Image: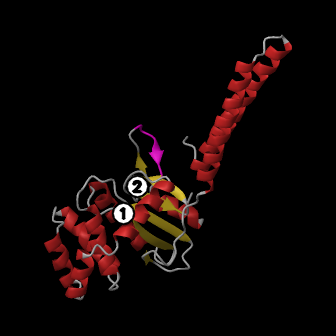
Amino acid sequence: MSLSKSNFLKVIIVILILATLTTLAVFYFKQKSGGGDDKLINEVTGLKDSNNEIVAKAEEVGLRELRRIDDTDYVWGEASAPVQVIVYSDFLSPFSLQFSDTLKQVKQEFPGKVKIAFRHYSLGMFPDEIQTANASECAGEQGKFWEMVDALFANNKVNNLNQEQYQKDAQALNLDAVKFTECLQSAKYQSKIEAQIKEGKSFGVNGVPTVFVNNKILPGAYPFADFTDSSGAKQLGLKSLISMELGTGN
């Protein structure tokens, strides 16, 4: 069973405190037996200072919570939907492409019950990751973010992600071509994209896609249906996990 981020940090803090107490106990008994010296005192003091610094950093990380969906996000679904699904993804990786089909199933299965936010993330594996993300944002400012998302994943399927194709997609979506081109060429949304990548890392994202269902992290391209993992263990798919959040699952 894996530990949550907050529980993991608590374990670290407890271990550090116990280490400090153990060393202090050794120091105490050495003093009682006449074996204490300045070197040991310095070691204990150094250990305490080091542990205090680590604990402070751990507490700082532990205070960071996933940013809930807000008006800076492009959102599919009703604002009042009880389950929020936040996806950190890109448009070029095969796993993100695979998960895009899972998201379509979620939309079909849970209309009115789920709201989905797409946030950008990059592993730096593909040279056009940021530019492709920019294409989605430039379409978004003309009200066609999700339509461009679908188009970009469709392009991924046929290995056709490039500037010329973005322009064709914009035309197919009836976007203002001049405005879209100017937006794309200026890398207008690069700072927003990079901020989301940095933010994602602070929430524990280290791969694409990474999904949060009501703040519960699900790394990887989680399938819609229940599945058996590589160790042979049965795992719940996204459908079951969302159903549990709605109080309708097992």
Asked if the residue at tag 2 contacts the one at tag 1, i.e. Cβ–Cβ closer than 8 Å, the answer is: yes
Spatial separation of the CA atoms under disc 1 and disc 2: 8 Å
Residue 33, by quadrant, is top right
* Sequence-first disc among 1 and 2: 1
Residue 8: horizontal and vertical position, in percent? 60, 43
Dot 2 falls on a residue whose secondary structure is loop
Q: Is residue 147 above or below residue 63?
A: below
235 drawn magenta: yes
Residue 15: horizontal and vertical position, in percent? 66, 34
Left or right: 72 in relation to 91: right
Question: Which label is found at residue 222?
Answer: 2
Residue 18: horizontal and vertical position, in percent? 71, 31
Where is mark 1, residue-wise? 102
Residues shaded magenta: 231-236
In this view of the protein, can residue 247 be seen by the observer? Answer: yes
Residue 143, by quadrant, is bottom left
Q: Amino acid at mark 1?
A: Thr
Residue 185, by quadrant, is bottom left
